[in-house]
Image: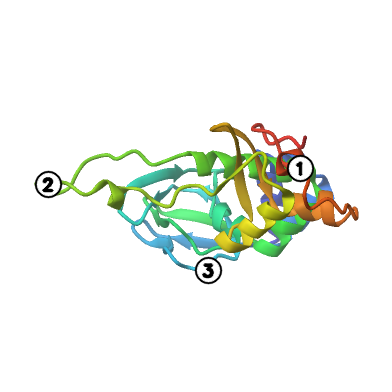
């Protein structure tokens, strides 16, 4: 049985994927691996290398941080695993099926190619990454008589850079922090997000010799739109 038409139909109705044309949707569908995960089983572990975007076809997934706190839930049509994939970093959250779940696994290289070929698709996931970076899990309860120290409840803070920093400084900080995206802050307020792809596409690829230009000029605004 050829499942590609059904996979393509499902993908074309998802936020972000609805911006892809038929050729791109079919390429995404062809790069999907289908996995079945029973309730109570893990999908990804903290520290894993991630090479796929996960899309919930049916069922439900919970993501927990290293302290066991709930970060978010993913239901039918939701994506997860994109922060580690976009940052080329180890998985930061444990993902576990809370229902028997059917999961689509989209090859990371195809995901990257689609981001490069379709600006709207790329913007959608940059916005999702930005939202995830700005969201902290709520502390649901303290454990033990004395609870836990605040330092134990806080995961790594988002990587930020000042709006007046230069492109070169931003690129160097991405390398040092081992991330591919950073929040740009202007006088303490969120002003945009810059990715390594922004620097490659808007500076390196067009031959601009402006390493001292302000990074904010090459960052997407808070809504994810290129400036």
The answer to whether residue 169 of the structure is visible from this angle is yes
Query: Is 183 on the left or on the right of 224, as rendered?
Result: left
Relative image position of residue 136 (x, y in whole percent): 42, 41
Label 2 and label 3: CA atoms lie apart by 35 Å
SS at circle 1: helix
**Residue at x-position 53% and y-position 62%:** 35
Query: Of marks 1 and 2, which one's residue comes earlier in the chain?
Result: 2
Label 1 and label 2: CA atoms lie apart by 47 Å
Q: Residues within 10 Å of mark 1 (few under 14, many from 20)?
A: many
The tag on residue 218 is 1
Query: Is 119 on the left or on the right of 137, as rendered?
Result: right
**Residue at x-position 63% and y-position 39%:** 127
The tag on residue 49 is 3
The answer to whether residue 29 of the structure is visible from this angle is no
Relative image position of residue 110 (x, y in whole percent): 72, 61
Q: How is the image coloured?
A: rainbow
Report the mark closest to the observer, 1 or 2: 1
**Is residue 81 shown above or below 107?**
above
């Amino acid at each position: 049985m050829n499942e590609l038409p059904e996979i393509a139909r499902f993908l074309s109705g998802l936020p972000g994927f609805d911006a892809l044309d038929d050729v791109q949707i079919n390429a995404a569908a062809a790069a999907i691996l289908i996995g079945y995960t029973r309730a109570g089983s893990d999908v990804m572990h903290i520290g894993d290398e991630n090479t796929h975007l996960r899309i919930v076809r049916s069922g439900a997934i919970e993501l927990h941080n290293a302290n066991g706190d709930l970060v978010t839930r993913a239901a039918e049509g939701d994506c997860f695993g994109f922060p580690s994939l976009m940052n080329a970093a180890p998985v930061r959250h444990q993902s576990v099926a809370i229902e028997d779940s059917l999961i689509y696994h989209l090859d990371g290289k195809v995901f990257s190619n689609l981001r490069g070929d379709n600006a709207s698709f790329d913007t959608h996931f940059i916005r999702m990454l930005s939202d995830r970076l700005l969201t902290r899990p709520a502390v649901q309860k303290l454990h033990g008589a004395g609870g836990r120290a605040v330092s134990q409840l806080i995961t790594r803070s988002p990587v930020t850079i000042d709006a007046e920093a230069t492109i070169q400084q931003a690129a160097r900080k991405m390398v040092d922090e081992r991330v591919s995206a950073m929040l740009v802050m202007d006088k303490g307020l969120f002003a945009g997000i810059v990715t390594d792809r922004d620097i490659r596409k808007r500076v390196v690829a067009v031959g601009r010799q402006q390493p001292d230009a302000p990074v904010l000029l090459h960052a997407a605004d808070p809504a994810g739109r290129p400036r």
